[in-house]
């Protein structure tokens, strides 16, 4: 019987790592680290791994590559944009996941999932097999997305639990709240470029840090992963957005990495703006434990306003319907949120961390 075990990623906002077993085939889906406290999956006794398939490049899905030796250095698969943008040398050399159609007799399919550059859902074993959504979002205006096909079992992204505010509503709330100069610390390989595009479309002066510029330039060579018109939007952004550096004077709307002001231009600017008491800092993603973002929001020197990059409740419902799985694991949120989902929806979410079918 095929089997999926959440080594990590169920019952907690923890690093993604799922073990798929069917016949002799043993695959890992993602091998992450963090996002809180640099947590790593517990791979003790995990046994032979035939390959690791990565859904996207974020650290909480790839940072566990430090364990690659410990799991026997199996072949790695990632989509081309994920490899092109990765800082891990091993992932840069990964085989293209979108070209993989079968491994050890198990069919492999993937499709764009709108969460990040080159991010995908993955189906293993066809209609009687298993779908892993990774992180997924159907609201992106820049990254192409698609619903995964049917499968018997599903691991799906429930990062936001029952929250159902749309990205359009969030954009309106942010538009109403900003007072320039305003800094948005953002992941360059995530929502940062979309945010820059949004503010540009509102006629605001926008500047982006070198990390964002580099991602935008790289994505121009991966057009099929973008929405229709995505390439034009990025070209427009690259020509119109100002250059934001560590020593730039705060001005207009500033988009800079990293997302928790833990590194890069965002760290330097956020520290300076806070010290000078000049301008707003708004965080829009997960506030990682122990990072500057959490401390700044708690101290009242920065705000948190969410920008969806995971599925809200009504999108989770679309996923559940599209895949029509007999059983599912709710991933990337705490146990209490899983319990809330089960009682509110009646979806076939199973307790524990194992599915067999
Ligand atoms: Zn992600």
Image (cartoon, rainbow, N blue to C red):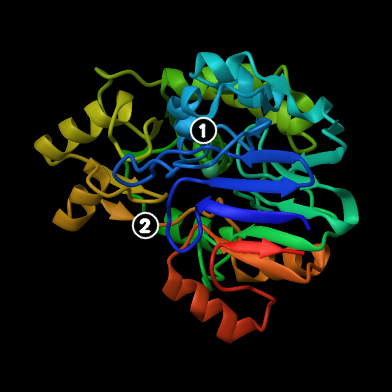
Q: Is residue 216 above or below residue 138?
A: above
Distance between the alpha carbons at the discs numbered 1 and 2? 34 Å
- Which label is found at residue 62? 1
In this view of the protein, can residue 238 be seen by the observer? Answer: no
Residue at the limit of the structure toward the left, as seen here? 275
Q: Which mark is residue 105?
A: none
Residue plotted at (75% across, 38% down):
227
Q: Who's the residue at 17% across and 39% down the image?
A: 278
Which of the pair 283/48 is nearer the observer? 48
Q: Earlier in the sequence, mark 1 or mark 2?
A: 1
- The x, y position of residue 221, in whole percent, is 72, 17
In the rendered view, does 255 fall on the left or right side of 342?
left
Q: Which residue is mark 2?
A: 177
Q: Does 325 appear above or below 131?
A: below
Name the quadrant of the N terminus.
bottom right
Horizontally, residue 87 falls left or right of residue 54, namely: left
Measured from the top left, where is residue 330 in percent x and y? Answer: 58, 65
Q: Quadrant of residue 236?
A: top right
| In the depicted structure, whether residue 93 falls above or below residue 10 | above
């Amino acid at each position: 019987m095929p089997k999926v075990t959440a080594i990590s990623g169920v019952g907690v906002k923890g690093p993604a790592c799922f073990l798929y077993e069917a016949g002799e085939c043993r695959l890992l889906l993602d091998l992450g680290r963090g996002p809180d406290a640099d947590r790593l999956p517990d791979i003790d006794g995990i046994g032979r791994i035939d390959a690791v398939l990565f859904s996207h490049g974020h650290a909480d899905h790839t940072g566990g590559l430090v364990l690659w030796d410990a799991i026997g250095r199996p072949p790695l698969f990632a989509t081309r944009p994920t490899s092109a943008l990765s800082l891990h040398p091993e992932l840069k050399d990964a085989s293209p996941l979108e070209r993989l159609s079968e491994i050890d007799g198990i069919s492999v399919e993937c499709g764009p999932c709108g969460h990040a550059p080159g991010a995908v859902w993955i189906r293993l074993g066809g209609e009687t097999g298993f779908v892993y959504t990774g992180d997924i979002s159907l609201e992106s205006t820049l990254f192409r997305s698609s619903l995964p096909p049917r499968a018997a079992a599903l691991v799906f992204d429930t990062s936001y639990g029952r929250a159902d505010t749309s990205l359009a509503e969030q954009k309106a709330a942010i538009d109403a709240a900003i007072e320039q100069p305003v800094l948005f610390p953002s992941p360059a390989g995530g929502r940062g470029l979309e945010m820059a595009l949004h503010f540009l479309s509102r006629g605001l002066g926008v500047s982006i840090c070198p990390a964002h510029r580099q991602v935008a330039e790289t994505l121009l060579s991966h057009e099929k992963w973008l929405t229709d018109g995505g390439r034009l939007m990025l070209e427009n952004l690259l020509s119109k957005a100002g250059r934001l550096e560590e020593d730039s004077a705060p001005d207009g709307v500033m988009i800079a990495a990293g997302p928790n002001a833990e590194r890069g231009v965002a760290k330097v600017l956020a520290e300076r703006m806070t010290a000078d008491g000049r301008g707003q800092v708004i965080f829009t993603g997960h506030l990682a434990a122990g990072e500057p973002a959490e401390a700044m929001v708690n101290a009242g020197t920065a705000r948190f306003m969410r920008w969806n990059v995971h599925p809200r409740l009504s999108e989770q419902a679309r996923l559940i319907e599209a895949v029509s799985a007999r059983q599912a694991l709710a991933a990337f949120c705490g146990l209490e949120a899983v319990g809330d989902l089960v009682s509110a929806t009646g979806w076939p979410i199973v307790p524990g961390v194992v599915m067999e079918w």
